[in-house]
Amino acid sequence: MGRVLVVGSGGREHALATRFNQSPSVETVYIAPGSPCMDDVATLVDIDALDFEALKAFALKHAIDLVVVGPEIPLVQGIQDAFKDTNICVFGPSKYCANLEGSKAFAKEMMKQANIKTAGYETFDDVTQAIAYAKTKTYPLVLKASGLAAGKGVVIVNCFEDAESELHHMMTHNKFEDAGNVVVIEDFLEGEEFSYLCLVSHDTIIPLQVSQDHKRAFDHDEGPNTGGMGAYTPVDSITDDDLNCALNDVVKPIVSTLLNQGHPYTGVLYAGLMKTKDGIQVIEFNVRFGDPETEVLMLALESDLYQVIMDLMSGKKTELQWTKDYVIGAVLASQGYPDAYQKGAVIKGLETLKTPVFHMGTTRNDHGVIATGGRVLFVTARADTLQKAQAMLYQEIDKIDCDALFYRRDIGFHNS
Ligand code: AMP
Ligand code: GLY
């Protein structure tokens, strides 16, 4: 029987811990640090996700078999490398491979080497040169902070004047702190976006079912980019041909390029893809489970995730089983997110919901469940059609009483 440690504290980790907790082959699930409302599915461990030595000591003491790392920052800072001298399986990439997410400049360079289709681009560490380049371009144009910015470091500008002022914000005034010291300026692509997540170990690749995220804050894709405001799976507009292309022309080449460089990839490889009129192109790579895609994927997955990962890490590939239902979910976020927001609102009515809710940023005190994060809750629903699942989702959300939260009312509608 397996003993699992999930690292992180958001909705993605709550969903992973829930899935492991349901697994017949798992004895105990720990979550570090987790948050109070996750104590129904995992034992909370009061260790920070970046305190690798303390996590390692805990894992050794409690005979953990598998560590699953949720967020990107521990991966980019080298949590997998920190466990190298143990025989504990860490499902997450090495520090080197995590650069695929930690540095957009690195990701672009790897795609060039692997001959993968992605938007044309240039990389700059000098604002004057960046502005001079922006002057030569057609618009819209995409400006990306190269470093980690919690999904918010991409700005799409419609004219040169906006590009100039935004480049100053990013590169001179540190809008995204050090993440904007290097900026990638990318051609604008048009098409349907989808999230293609694969479980990877060396050259073995197991694709998950296709899902779609909604990155902008408000309905009709308006407002600033966020970490993601809702998700659903599967996505009918993405065909088997698209998925073959995603596997053969994107994921396989990047995994084998890293392997040939002496850096085998372990963990989730998340390709953010766009179906354009020129075929499938890469928007970004992430080196972890997506959030909130994982929340819907874990509800849709019927296979035993622990067994699948342990088999994969010993080179065995499993055919995954998925529900035939559509699974959908919406984020309830604090008013003001992704900018500054108030914390501390009491959330009422949660006990009346019939569908699973994952806690993205909450705590619990004598007043009940309290909002503490930018993204606070992820409410889900499932049904045999996307339309029915949507209707159920919004009925469930209506039962929650908290004026301090907002959510998008159009999750999945584009494809229904
Ligand atoms: P990223 O953090 O790189 O995924 O970018 C955030 C969002 O910005 C993406 O989900 C897209 O909606 C948008 N985006 C990023 N790059 C491009 C591009 N080259 N063309 C059009 N939209 C883009
Ligand atoms: N949902 C987007 C992400 O996880 O980066």
Image (cartoon, rainbow, N blue to C red):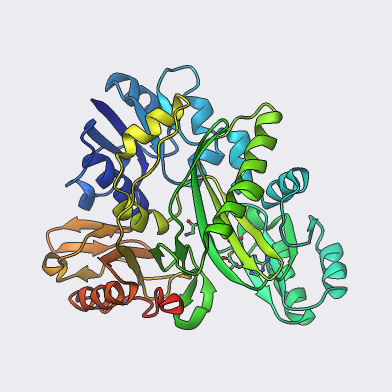
Q: Is 168 on the left or on the right of 227, as rendered?
A: right
Q: Position of residue 377 (x, y in %)?
A: 30, 64
> In the rendered image, which quarter contains the N terminus?
top left
Q: Which residue is rendered at x = 52% and y = 63% of the image? A: 239
> In the rendered image, which quarter contains the C terminus?
bottom left
Q: Position of residue 283 (x, y in %)?
A: 63, 60
Image: 294 above or below 137: above
Q: Which residue is rendered at x = 32% and y = 63% of the image? A: 327
Between 380 and 323, the one lying in front of the other is 323
Q: Position of residue 393 (x, y in %)?
A: 26, 73
Q: Is 97 on the left or on the right of 75, as rendered?
A: right
Q: Which residue is rendered at x = 45% and y = 65% of the image? A: 235
Q: Is 194 on the left or on the right of 257, as rendered?
A: left
In which quarter of the view is residue 291 placed? bottom left
Residue 324 makes an appearance in the image: yes
Between 168 and 203, the one lying in front of the other is 203
Image: 180 above or below 349: above
Q: Which residue is rendered at x = 43% and y = 71% of the image? A: 337
Q: Identify the residue at the far front of this view.
A: 241
Total labels drawn = 0
Between 393 and 327, the one lying in front of the other is 327
In which quarter of the view is residue 361 placed? bottom left
